[in-house]
Structures are given as structure tokens and as C-alpha cells.
Image (cartoon, grey):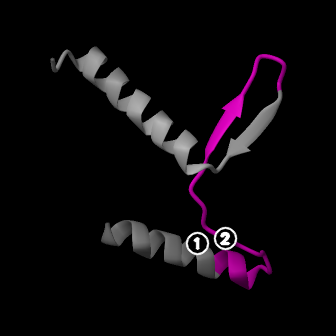
């Protein structure tokens, strides 16, 4: 965890020194075959993605 804080801190310092406006967010992205992209920031959508990812891991690893 500490390495993530250090690396993100260094990245933020570099970007700020170059004049970029930065922010931190939690989101998922979606895309389609037509090339359209969308960013989803809703908590329900993110929790649904986490839930289905856990199901996928359980099925692939044969835990149950």
C-alpha cells in the first residue's frame, strides 16, 4: 500500500509541476463494438462489476 501512495504522490507532483489539473476518481469504463465509450461513476454499477468479477474468479478457479 505504501508503494502506491509514494508512486501516486510522485506522479501528482510531476503533473502539478507541468500545470495539469489532476483528480482522483473511482469509475468503470464501458465500450461497444461501434467504438462508443462511456465512463460510469455510479456506486451501483461499480458494485455490480465487482460482484460479477468475483463470480468470474470463483468459476475460473473452481473454488466452489
Q: Which residue is mark 1?
A: 11
Give the quarter of the figure containing the C terminus: top left
Q: Which residue is mark 2?
A: 23
Range covered by the magenta-colored residues? 14-35
Expressed as whole percent of the image width and height from the top left, the position of residue 44 reads 54, 44
Expressed as whole percent of the image width and height from the top left, the position of residue 39 reads 71, 44
Residue 60: give its label: none
Main SS type for the magenta part?
loop
Expressed as whole percent of the image width and height from the top left, the position of residue 5 reads 42, 73
Q: Residue furthest front?
A: 44
N-terminal label among 1 and 2: 1
Q: Up-down: is 6 above or below 38?
A: below
Foreground pick, 28 / 14: 28
10 Å crowding of disc 1: few (<14), some (14-19), many (20+): few
Which residue is found at the position 80% from the left and 81% from the top?
19
Q: CA distance from mark 1 to mark 2?
A: 12 Å
Q: Is residue 48 magenta?
A: no
Q: Up-down: is 37 above or below 13?
A: above
Which residue is found at the position 75% from the left and 22% from the top?
32
Q: Is residue 18 magenta?
A: yes
> Picture quarter containing residue 33?
top right
Query: Secondary structure under badge 1?
Result: helix
Q: In this rendering, would 50 be left or right of 58?
A: right
Foreground pick, 1 / 13: 1
Query: Secondary structure under badge 2?
Result: loop
Expressed as whole percent of the image width and height from the top left, the position of residue 31 reads 72, 28
Which residue is found at the position 77% from the left and 75% from the top?
21
Q: Up-down: is 10 above or below 24?
A: below
**Disc nearest the viewer among 1 and 2:** 2
Q: Residue furthest left?
A: 64
> Picture quarter containing residue 62?
top left
Which residue is found at the position 49% from the left and 35% from the top?
49
Amino acid at each position: 500500500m505504501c508503494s502506491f501512495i509514494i508512486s501516486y504522490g510522485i506522479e501528482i507532483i510531476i503533473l502539478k509541476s507541468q500545470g495539469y489539473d489532476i483528480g482522483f476518481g473511482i469509475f468503470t469504463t464501458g465500450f461497444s463494438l461501434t467504438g462508443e465509450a462511456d465512463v460510469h461513476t455510479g456506486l451501483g454499477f461499480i458494485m455490480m462489476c465487482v460482484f460479477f468479477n468475483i463470480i468470474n474468479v470463483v468459476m475460473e478457479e473452481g473454488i466452489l
